[in-house]
Amino acid sequence: MSTNTLYDIVQQKHDTHSAVVIPGGPELSFAAFRQQILRVTDQLVAYGITAGDRLSSALVNGLEYATVFLGTTFARAVAAPLNPNYTVEEFLFYLEDTQSKAMIVPKNGGAVAREAARQMGVPIWEVWFDGKNVQLQATSDVPILRTVVPVTPLPSDVALILHTSGTTSRPKAVPLNHGNLMTSVRNIAKTYHLDSSYRSYIVMPLFHVHGLIGAMLSTLYTGGSVVIPPKFSASSFWSEFVRYDCNWYSAVPTIHQILLQHEHKNGKPASRGRLSFVRSCSSSLAAATFHELESTFGVPVIEAYAMTEASHQMTANNMPVDGKRKPGSVGVGKGVQVAILDDEGKAVPQGKEGEVCIKGANVTAGYLNNPAANASSFHKNGFFRTGDQGFMDTDGFLFLTGRLKELINRGGEKISPLEIDSVMLHHPQVAEAIAFGVEDKMYGQEVHAAVVPKDLKLLKDPVALKKLEEDIRQFALKKLASFKVPKKVFFNGTLPRTATGKIQRRHVAAFFAQPKSKL
């Protein structure tokens, strides 16, 4: 069995340990889990899948997803998982962009993905668990090879292709090889001191690097186990977390905030079993939310910084045994070289803002079939340009100040929307808040904001909303220079998000620019 590939995820030394638990369903040991993965691998090889072939899937979290993903990579093929909630048009784009050999869907689901595959002429394969084994079967005639020849992946084999929206309208394909993924898995396991005693409750979608690498693969690699519900539910989270003896979870700030709101709504603290720490990633965690999480849950909250091109994690705050943590910072490099560089790729003075750039074995070698993006995304010294702006303090802790493309330029004043977000989130009546720039004839850009009030009943009272808007502005004036205070505050019951729970400012700005969303 090869090393530094995803084969390492299901090591034989862990065979008797519990690997995967499906709430209300099966619980598989590492030995049983590996057997199911290899069943899928053998079936793919029998269907003629060879090294480098790309297979798309539209699956929810579960045993089928886990076995299909790893089974694909064990066959030296490339997994290209997609959000099951995409439209036909979105599926068509991704199938064409990846040149997928097949679309894998649930046996009794995935109608939209099936339709896109039919339009593209891509074979449709169904996957399901029959109570004993994971079954994978083509829905049309596919030649079956009589002999299945065992295959072994190489560290240089591309294992995963995901798309990132970046700053362009066309998503960019990010290929990650086994070596990239395993470097990240080891970095994450080391950061949080994961071992076989850890059990993670998976709340993030596994078609995204956060759930896949940050929570599932990193836990399994150390002999720990993962509990995989089909989707996140605040109402069942703590009961299942305790029932299945979990002790950590990783999520975006949105999910943390939902759990906190659910806690307050119930009026009594939920049993949190043996929760040992909480990880936050994929979006900036406001200091106010950080402190509320720690005081409510009574455990350390560890914020990390990640992106798809880096196979997920780049930096993280320290676990308590490893040193200081700094709320508002995304920590220090964890097995990844981090530098603050200018446009020419030269280091800026310590404490000065610049672009966050990274280098490491976890970083993609480049985007798929996109030489223009590769030329603009890598400096000549090999550092990858994240597109994020930040600075490092004297202790080497990284502080993000915004996306370079998201900075608001108001009359020549460069404003970080993250700073405004943080202030608004401290307001006692604000549940969620995000600032963004809008076009303005006088200043070039003006600051606006969108807010979800804690009391949603206020949305039906225009007078109360007008009063709350002014109250938020006066509150912000105590913390911010006047030019940073939002000129207009929109109110809504929710904020538009991506499938993984992220809030992208340009989408929020476009959403609230529509007349129907104005109150």
Image (spheres, rainbow, N blue to C red):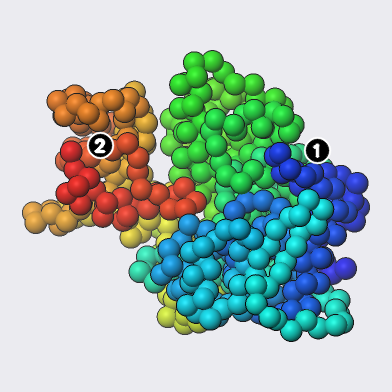
Residue at image coords 25%, 30%: 459
Q: Secondary structure at mark 1?
A: loop
Q: Dot 2 lies on which element? A: strand
Q: Cβ–Cβ below 8 Å for labels 1 and 2?
A: no
Viewer-closest of 41 and 124: 124
Image quarter in which the C terminus is found: top left
Question: As displayed, is residue 26 above or below residue 376?
Answer: above
Q: Is residue 79 above or below residue 354?
A: below
**Label 1, label 2: how far apart the Cα atoms are:** 44 Å
Place residue 162 in its image quadrant: bottom right
Q: Earlier in the sequence, mark 1 or mark 2?
A: 1
Residue linked to disc 2: 491
> For residue 127, which quarter of the picture?
bottom right
Residue 360 in the image, given as x and y percentages of width and height: 63, 65
> Percent x, y for residue 79?
64, 69
Q: Is residue 315 left or right of residue 51?
A: left
Q: Residue at x 74, y 31 (%)?
A: 245
- The percent coordinates of residue 437 (x first, y second) are 24, 51
Q: Is 116 above or below relative to 487?
A: below
- Can residue 469 be seen in this snapshot? yes
Q: Nearer the viewer, residue 346 or 358?
A: 358
Q: Position of residue 152 (x, y in %)?
A: 82, 74
The three-letter code of the residue at mark 1 reads Ser
Q: Is residue 84 left or right of residue 458?
A: right
Left or right of residue 195: residue 255? left
Which residue is denoted by mark 1 in the rendering?
197
| Quadrant where the N terminus is found in the figure | bottom right
Above or below 391: residue 180:
below
Looking at the picture, which amino acid does disc 2 mark?
Phe
Count up the numbered dots.
2
